[in-house]
Image (cartoon, rainbow, N blue to C red):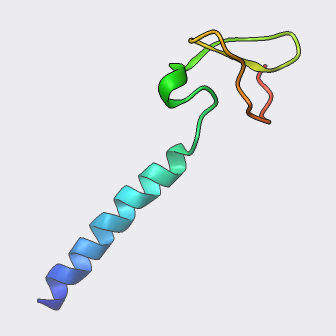
Amino acid sequence: MLNKIFVAMIISVCFVSYAEARGNQPCSKSKGGIKACTAEGKFLCNDGSMSASKKKCK
């Protein structure tokens, strides 16, 4: 019984770690992803809006 609980905990940690590693990306979800990078280093999203991300693109 304890073995099964331990295995379940290890599997759940692996899935959580994978989700955390992906993190939030600029232009994620409804914005459709990154279309281009502007001259100022901002992300242009596929829906035409500018990302509010503080990250700079190259």
Q: Is residue 39 above or below residue 55?
A: above
- Residue drawn at x 88%, y 16% is 40
Which image quarter is the C terminus in?
A: top right
Counting from the top left corner in percent of width and height, residue 24 is at 58, 41
Q: Residue furthest right?
A: 40
Counting from the top left corner in percent of width and height, residue 39 is at 86, 10
Quarter of the rendering containing residue 45: top right
Q: Is residue 5 left or right of residue 26?
A: left
- Residue drawn at x 80%, y 28% is 56
Q: Is residue 15 above or below residue 51?
A: below
Q: Is residue 37 left or right of residue 14?
A: right
Q: Residue furthest left?
A: 1
- Residue drawn at x 23%, y 73% is 8
User: In terms of depth relative to the viewer, which is nearer, 47 or 36?
Assistant: 47
Counting from the top left corner in percent of width and height, residue 7 is at 22, 75
Q: Is residue 50 left or right of residue 6?
A: right
Q: Is residue 47 left or right of residue 10?
A: right
